[in-house]
Image (cartoon, grey):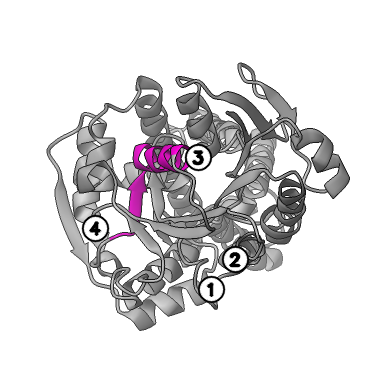
Amino acid sequence: MNIGIIGVNGFIGKSLYFSFCQQSYQLTGFSRKKIPGINWRELDFSQSVDSWLNQLKHLDVVINASGIYKETRDNRFSDVHTTGPVKLFEACIKLNIRVIQISAIGAEKEIPTTEFLQSKRIADQYLLGSNTSQVVLYPGIVLGEGGASTKQLCLLARLRVIPVISAFRQPLPVISIYQLVEFINQILFNWPEKSISSVLLSKPEKLQYTLENLRRWMGLNNKWFLKIYLPDWLLSFIFLILPNLSIGLFNKQSMNMLSDYQSSGSSKKYNKYIKYETDESLPASQSLAKFNASDDFIKDGKLKILSCFNVLSLSLIWCGSGISSLINMKISRELVEMLGINQGYSDPLIITAAIADIILGLLIWVKRYRRIIVYVQIAFMLVYSFLITLFLPVFWLHPFAPVLKNISMFVLAMYLLVDEGKG
């Protein structure tokens, strides 16, 4: 069987490819960037249906695992989830190629709650509306190495004191990557006579249980849970003023998805779809914990924790510096006067610099602008250090080393730039 996997560079696509390599399938992986060690073809969703016809004519099955969780300037939901896949599906239908479309839970609803799910649903419905036998899958949160949600959950699970927000008191809609691959394998061996759409969930489990199994998976123990109650109105207000806030599963899109899932009675209203339970109905995190996390994954997790503390440290230093300058105005005025600045300008200058420091300390938490903010912080540090060296060189010999500590801040900032570049 010749299988083409669209989006082979992604978590699910890569897992499918290397799992199927152990079987007798002939595989072709499609992605924008070349991946070593696979039979690779370039992926271009902007290409025409005729171009797809030439690329796909040797295949029996196409699995579309492409997708983006957030939009960027170059990647829009409409291009990656709708326009591109629809042209791909049109070519597959013309060539009589069977298709497995990996969508997302929530996209099966008539009116999905987010633009991400809405864009998925359009392509799903196009495929299901064809006169051929096709498959659309709606997996819940997929747990496994390489999964963005799994990485975020593991960061939370690594803590000795783990905060559990009340919004996650209901079971999570999850499935492990092993269960998902197993189900797709079953579909390939027993292709349905008519098109089907399937919600894929493992046995329900609460967040605390998931985190416990993830700790076991990473070889950790000794933890405490801190339950935090946040009323719905407060959650709505938080995401209204901070729409891009994302801490583990605590982000606007995940909360909307969980709200949909919980309002449906924990998937009881999915009765017109196939609700598949895999691996002897094991919870997803328990299915994952049957195997140990790789050493590379554990190491990356430790480094990511350090990166989070790096952000926290820089934020506290900049905010603390600004607040300290405002509280200790007398000392601040004396330092400014030592720079030779006229007394009449000292207070406006101190207040402006303090507010700038506080803003830089707060904005570093906004991931979208983090690299820019870090560059500005580095520029401020260089300017401050230059002025002190020029006008107050004695501060380099201060017993508390306030200027020398700028070197460690500079290293923290540079490390954060490198870490953000990898992401």
Q: Quadrant of the C terminus?
A: top right
| Amino acid type for the residue under numbered disc 3 | Ile
Q: Read off the residue under disc 2.
A: 121
Of the two numbered discs 3 and 4 on the same chain, state the one appearing first in sequence: 3
Q: Position of residue 268 (x, y in %)?
A: 29, 72
Q: Residues within 10 Å of mark 4 (few under 14, many from 20)?
A: some
| Amino acid type for the residue under numbered disc 4 | Pro
Q: Secondary structure at mark 1?
A: loop
Q: Which mark is residue 341?
A: none
Of the two numbered discs 2 and 3 on the same chain, state the one appearing first in sequence: 3
Q: Read off the residue under disc 3.
A: 12
Pointer 1 with pointer 4, Cβ within 8 A = no
Pointer 2 with pointer 1, Cβ within 8 A = yes
Of labels 2 and 1, the one closer to you: 2
Q: Residues within 10 Å of mark 1 (few under 14, many from 20)?
A: some
Q: Read off the residue under disc 1.
A: 112
| Amino acid type for the residue under numbered disc 2 | Arg
